[in-house]
Amino acid sequence: MSSTDHDAPVLVLNAGSSSLKYQVLVPETARVLAGGTVERIGEDGSGVEDHAAGMRRVTAELGDAGVDLGRTGLRAVGHRVVHGGPDFSDPVVVDDAVVRDIRDLVPLAPLHNPGALEGIEAARATFDVPQVAVFDTAFFASLPPEAATYAIPREVSAEHRLRRYGFHGTSHRYVSRAVADLLGRPLESFTQVVLHLGNGCSASAVDGGVAVDTSMGLTPLQGLVMGTRSGDVDPAVFTFLHEQAQMSVAEIDTMLNKRSGLKGLAGVNDFREVLARADGGDQDARLALDVYVHRLRHYIGAYAAVLGGLDVLTFTAGVGENSAPLRARVVETLGRLGLAVDPERNEAPSREARVISPDGSAVTVTVVPTNEELEIARQTVALLDRSA
Ligand code: ADP
């Protein structure tokens, strides 16, 4: 069997600075052959000194899982790259020039792109198959200027490439298309808001399959309340804390990214724990939930206005897929905007994509499990098929 056979799998890699998450799957059937995460790369005592060693661990784990790439063939490697900057609006086949371009974007994504580059280098050295970079920002390259532009001096934005880029785009793209399949409606025929609620949280407004707004910005800090990230704050908080509390820029940055959001308000970032504490009467956890839900309603209303009317609202990712109480709370006060959930449908213990609003609702509310690996694998083979 050759590596170009259409039932041969794709390896999807999501490399962070100290981790290598992988999945081997067949994009056409969504069959997963193996998956896992190599963690603590580069940390003392982990036994995995760098990403090259991490990649050796991946191949060893694939062997342990009974995946013989020599026999099945490997069609390609698809890499998740967080930041594609202003120029990458589509997946690209990785070559030396693309590696240079991704490196050039490190100032925009200092926490994310270096890890992705290490993963790309290690995979290129290990697998002699085409490698494709799929960017988390790409789905939002379609944002119109009025949604992407910050109202700051244009020369400053231009010099430093400052704009709303948006993140979680692979998930928003996958889910918005899966909604069309679920409803049996052409993607072009409806407007939707997708809420990706995991540890990181983001909302998108999608018109006929095209993203027209999103809550994350230059970085993944903006927008919704997240596990440890604040989401929207008055930007003057930075100046205030720097000047009045003598906090350094690095300290404020760490506070907003790692010690804020649910963790900052409730003391814990795991949503299940926040819910349990709130149910037990913990006032901090209750306030955290109230702020989280208020922000969601704020964005749903804003995006319904941006879209000129909302047809579908979708929940996805760890919180969105699993927490019926959260979904009910978000929707409960939006009745006059045409939103409602059917309690039995909302609480059904299903892992499938499904409608949870009552029949005949003005706005259809859905739950759709995200699958970023499958989306990356699909985009990888679609690009290779187009360029074959
Ligand atoms: P990531 O953004 O890291 O991919 P996930 O999409 O897996 O994260 O989401 C993780 C979040 O999902 C955690 O806050 C976790 O508490 C929450 N979660 C998982 N299962 C449930 C559940 N049954 N009810 C409520 N929250 C849940």
Image: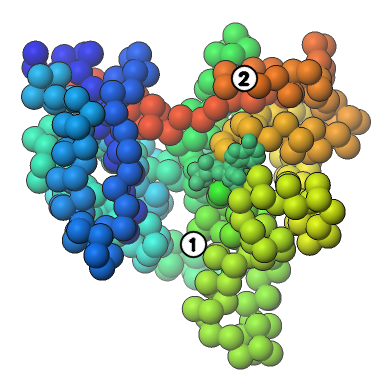
Around disc 2, counting alpha carbons within 10 Å, would you say few (fewer than 14), some (14 to 19), or many (20 or more)? few
Picture residue at 57% right of the left edge, 22% below the top: 351
Task: Please rate how many residues cluster around mark 1, counting C-alpha atoms within 10 Å: few if below 14, some from 14 to 19, many from 20.
Answer: many
Asked whether 284 or 13 is in front, the reply is: 284
Q: Amino acid at mark 1?
A: Leu
Question: Can residue 5 be seen?
Answer: yes
Front of the two marks 1 and 2 = 2
Question: Which amino acid type is shown beneath numbered disc 2?
Answer: Ser
- Residue furthest to the top: 184
Distance between the alpha carbons at the discs numbered 1 and 2: 41 Å
Front residue of 138/8: it is: 8
Say if 88 sits above or below 285 in the image.
above
Image location (x, y in percent) of residue 116: 29, 51
Relative to 233, 79 lies left or right:
left
- Ligand 1, image quadrant it occupies: top right
Question: What residue did someone put label 1 on?
Answer: 162
Compared to residue 10, the image places residue 159 above or below, namely: below
**Percent position (x, y) of residue 152?**
60, 67
Residue 350: mark in rendering: 2
At horizontal 68% and vertical 83% (from top left) the residue drawn is: 240
Position of 158 with respect to 127 (left or right) is right
User: Mark 1 near mark 2, Cβ–Cβ under 8 Å?
Assistant: no
Mark 2 beta carbon near ligand 1 (under 8 Å): no
